[in-house]
Image: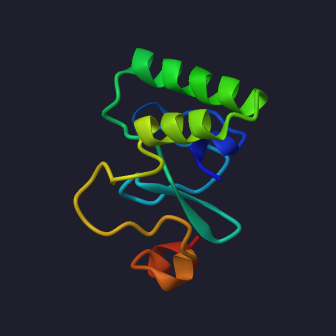
Amino acid sequence: MGVSDAVGIWTGAKRCPMDYPVTPDGRYFVVRGRLWRCANPKLPERKREKLVKDLMAARRTKDREGVDKAKRALGERGPTWWKGPDYNRYLAKNTPYADWFSAL
């Protein structure tokens, strides 16, 4: 599951669904206590929109390679779009975000 898996409205620069808490650094959103990577906020809006359309088309046709390609291009998979460790899919309580998450 990634940003595009969640139902929500994109929040400008953060590129994460508003329905879920977003970490203060904008790298992850949280669903049921688990961190999921947000899309790269440095992607130009038109490129991001095209990639999301590609992702949705790949999902409709059950094209796993297409889904993976789009998610990597969005920054939800593969190398991080920031320097530092990646806590994607970790429980927030087991990461440096634990205090932030417990305060929600």
**Residue 92 image position (x, y, % from top left):** 54, 75
Numbered label tally: 0
Using residue 9 as the reference point, say whether residue 101 is left or right of it. left
Q: Above or below — where is 56 with respect to 8?
A: above
Quarter of the image where one finds residue 80: bottom left
Using residue 13 as the reference point, say whether residue 89 is left or right of it. right
Q: Above or below — where is 8 with respect to 94?
A: above
For the C terminus, give its image quadrant: bottom right
Residue appearing at x 39%, y 35% in the figure? 13
Q: Is residue 17 visible?
A: no
Residue appearing at x 47%, y 47% in the figure? 76
Residue appearing at x 76%, y 27% in the figure? 61
Residue appearing at x 51%, y 20% in the figure? 49
Using residue 82 as the reference point, say whether residue 57 is left or right of it. right
Q: How is the image coloured?
A: rainbow
**Residue 79 image position (x, y, % from top left):** 33, 53
**Residue 27 image position (x, y, % from top left):** 41, 54
Residue lying at the far bottom of the rendered structure: 94
Q: Above or below — where is 100 with respect to 78?
A: below
Q: Give 103 or 81, whichever is nearer the viewer.
A: 81
**Residue 57 image position (x, y, % from top left):** 68, 23
Residue lying at the far top of the rendered structure: 46
Q: Give 59 or 22, whichever is nearer the viewer.
A: 59
Q: Is residue 67 visible?
A: yes
